[in-house]
Image (tube, rainbow, N blue to C red):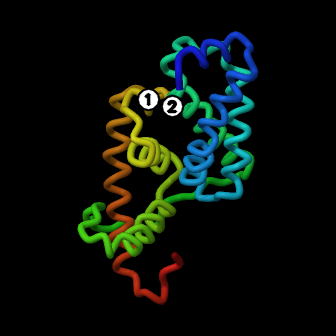
Amino acid sequence: MTRDLVERAMNGDRDAFGVLASRSLRRLVGTAGLILRSHGAADDVAQEALIRAWRDLPTLRDPDRFEGWLYRVLVRACHDHWRRQGSRPTPRGLGDSRPLTVADPADAVVDRAAIDAALARLTPDQRTVLVLRYYLDLTLDDIADAVGVPVGTVKSRIHRSLDAMQAAMAAEARRPARERTT
């Protein structure tokens, strides 16, 4: 995303914002889907985030930080969605850990299912930092901007979230196949 487009959008250029929005929409929907664990809600939340971004764009201080700022708007929209729903998912039993890497490409489908099941067991805040870091490959600074906390807090959240993720994967692996819901 070019600085020029962001600056033009900040000055009220709807076409420039349209370009920024169209470049971002797919990633925003995907990110919201991973965070919310609901692809149906992801479209609505991503659209809501873009509406808020257009409304709040004049408050962006550094056009070079647009992407991180936009993810912060998205994360807030996800949190608002949870509040409107009246509940937030909570983690279930957590146990030992196993590596998150995929050594054999043939195992990728099975590992993807295990990762998805483990993500579903995490809290929304845990899912948020992992999605921003490992799915979107954002920097720690950009994640800190997106979730509105210091970089040190982001580091500790990622560490605790990875521990919980690995524990959830181990717990899922110990469950008999007929009991797994993924």
**Rendered position, 175 above or below 42:** below
Specify the amino acid type for callout 2.
Ala
- Graded by Cα atoms within 10 Å as few (under 14), some (14 to 19) or many (20 or more), the crowding at tag 2 reads many
Q: Which mark is residue 142?
A: 1
| Residue at 50% from the left image edge and 53% from the top image edge | 123
Residue 50 is drawn in which quadrant? top right
Specify the amino acid type for callout 1.
Asp
Counting every numbered tag in the picture gives 2
- Graded by Cα atoms within 10 Å as few (under 14), some (14 to 19) or many (20 or more), the crowding at tag 1 reads many
Distance, label 1 to label 2, CA atoms, is: 6 Å
Q: Disc 1 vs disc 2: Cβ atoms closer than 8 Å?
A: yes
| Residue at 34% from the left image edge and 52% from the top image edge | 162
Secondary structure at badge 2 equals helix
Task: Give the farthest residue toward the bottom.
Answer: 178
Asked whether, in this view, residue 43 is left or right of residue 110, the answer is right
**Rendered position, 82 above or below 61:** below
Q: Which mark is residue 97?
A: none
| Residue at 28% from the left image edge and 61% from the top image edge | 101
**Rendered position, 132 above or below 7:** below
Residue 151 is drawn in which quadrant? top left
Q: Nearer the viewer, residue 172 or 132?
A: 132
Asked whether, in this view, residue 101 is left or right of residue 21, the answer is left
Q: Position of residue 7 (x, y in %)?
A: 61, 12
Q: Nearer the viewer, residue 120 or 123?
A: 120
Q: Which mark is residue 146?
A: 2
Q: Position of residue 46 (x, y in %)?
A: 67, 42
Q: Nearer the viewer, residue 160 or 67?
A: 67
Q: Position of residue 12 (x, y in %)?
A: 74, 14
Secondary structure at badge 1 equals helix
Q: Position of residue 47 (x, y in %)?
A: 72, 40
| Residue at 40% from the left image edge and 87% from the top image edge | 176
